[in-house]
Image (cartoon, grey):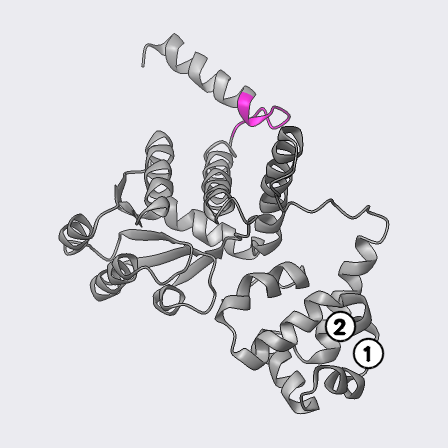
Amino acid sequence: MSVNRENVRVYISNILGGLSETDRHIAGFILGQPAQVAQMPVSRLAEAIQVSEATIVRFCKRIGYGGLLDLKAALKRELLEESEQPLPVSPDIFLDDSRNEVAQKIALTLDTTVKETIGLLDMKVVHPVVDRFLTASRVLFVGFGASGLSAMEARDKMNRQGIDSEAYTDRFTMTLKLANLKQEDLVVAFSHSGETPEVVNAFRLARKAGAHCLAITHNLQSPLIELADTWLLTCGSAGPFQGDSIATRLSQLFIIEFLCTEITRHNLRDSASTGLSIKELLIKERIKRESSGE
């Protein structure tokens, strides 16, 4: 399954935790000096990082590029596109920041999170994922801790879409309910790390039953990804006083909202009023139902 690698630095930043020590060293150099890397031949880059040329080529291929030239071409495109954009202020929060500065930096973190989540989305995958939701007999969302809140939010939104959905957020219920899965069911797992034992075990039960597994996670190199049939990547970095919860939760919630919107668009695609917004179409549908006494 493909992953969107067009946003080079966002992509590399979000897979950093799953890389080997050597690969992290190379990735760190690329993230720290993207403009220089985009212009360097492999020999100079190898000398600067103090690894062999072959190691750099293997790194590029391991993370999904055809080689160094492919990675550099993508990096040049990215740098060119943002060359006229002003650099944002740092989202890091410090003890001597004013309350207004804290509020502005949190807002910057939220804005950056949404943009990075969009950057990680592979739009070619979205259509088949939406089809899975529409054709599944049941959709079962699983998550633990903070990700459990996302699972419950997804359940509520999908039920409002008319999609039969449930959410399980504790080990006992996950094990009990997922033991009765069928092949027609869809299991959607939320886990920022992709390593939460309860959620990984839920996917093992789902695979045993033959149900389709969709992972929504930050970690491309994780047990959850290994068990998944399909996945969507979230981002998640935050300042020193924020932990990872605000970015993680927002990224997950954005994907839920995006999928629900795509399902709504699918359900309204046969409407004759193609020039109207989704909000206007939904209002028309509601008025129509109320007028007919449904």
Q: Is residue 115 above or below residue 192?
A: above
Q: Main secondary structure of the magenta part?
A: loop
Q: Residue at x 65, y 29 (%)?
A: 100
Dot 1: within a 10 Å radius of its alpha carbon, few (fewer than 14), some, or many (20 or more) residues? some
Q: Is residue 189 above or below residue 197?
A: above
The picture places residue 155, in percent across and down from the top left corner, at 32, 38
Q: Residue at x 55, y 27 (%)?
A: 278
Q: Is residue 222 magenta?
A: no
- Considering every residue shown, the one lying at the far front of the view is 96
Q: Is residue 284 above or below residue 66?
A: above
> Is 154 placed left or right of 253 in the picture?
left
Mark 1 sits on what residue?
Answer: 40
Could you tell me if the residues under marks 1 and 2 are in contact, i.e. CB atoms within 8 Å?
yes
The picture places residue 63, in percent across and down from the top left corner, at 58, 74
Mark 2: which secondary structure?
Answer: helix
Nearer the observer, 282 or 156: 156
Which label number is shown at residue 293?
A: none
Three-letter amino acid code of the residue under disc 2 = Lys
Q: Residue at x 37, y 39 (%)?
A: 154
The picture places residue 292, in percent across and down from the top left corner, at 36, 11
Mark 2 sits on what residue?
Answer: 72
User: Residue 2, can we see it?
Assistant: no
Nearer the observer, 113 or 213: 113
Q: Residue at x 63, y 40 (%)?
A: 111
- Residues in magenta, as a range: 271-279
The picture places residue 41, in percent across and down from the top left corner, at 81, 83
